Amino acid sequence: PAENLVFKISGMSCAACARRIEKALSGIEGIAEAGVNLAAETASVKYDPNSVTVEQMMDRIKKLGFEVVTEK
Ligand code: 9UX
């Protein structure tokens, strides 16, 4: 049962920032797909809510040094 969620992220200054976040999210158990849009300042994830929580995903992004809120 996959769900989709979009995060709003602030603090990304270059394409490498976006890739760092993408790789970190992709490495989390339970996340099937992760895509970061630098221009839109968003991260989209397709995930299994039984395997990973929204809080875990947000904590991972914060640990990389970015501000993050859920968008929808
Ligand atoms: Mo670019 Mo981002 O030089 O964490 S990698 S600013």
Image (cartoon, rainbow, N blue to C red):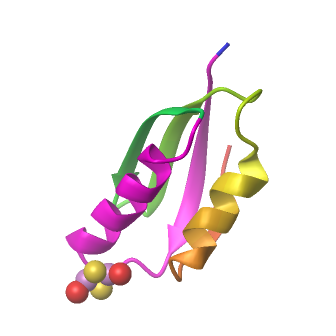
Residue drawn where x is 34% and y is 66% of the image:
20
- Residue 64 picture location, percent across and down: 50, 77
In the rendered image, which quarter is residue 18 located in? bottom left
Q: Is residue 41 left or right of residue 57?
A: left
- Residue 10 picture location, percent across and down: 51, 76
Above/below status of 50 relative to 28: above
Q: Quarter holding the C terminus?
A: top right
Above/below status of 71 relative to 47: below
Residue drawn where x is 64% and y is 54% of the image:
57
Q: Is residue 13 magenta?
A: yes
In the rendered image, which quarter is residue 49 located in? top right
Q: Tell me if residue 13 can be seen.
A: no
| Number of numbered labels in the structure image | 0
Along the line of sight, the residue nearer the viewer: 27 or 69: 27
Residue drawn where x is 43% and y is 45% of the image:
26
Along the line of sight, the residue nearer the viewer: 21 or 69: 21
- Residue 41 picture location, percent across and down: 43, 64
In the rendered image, which quarter is residue 61 located in? bottom right
The stretch in magenta equals 2-29
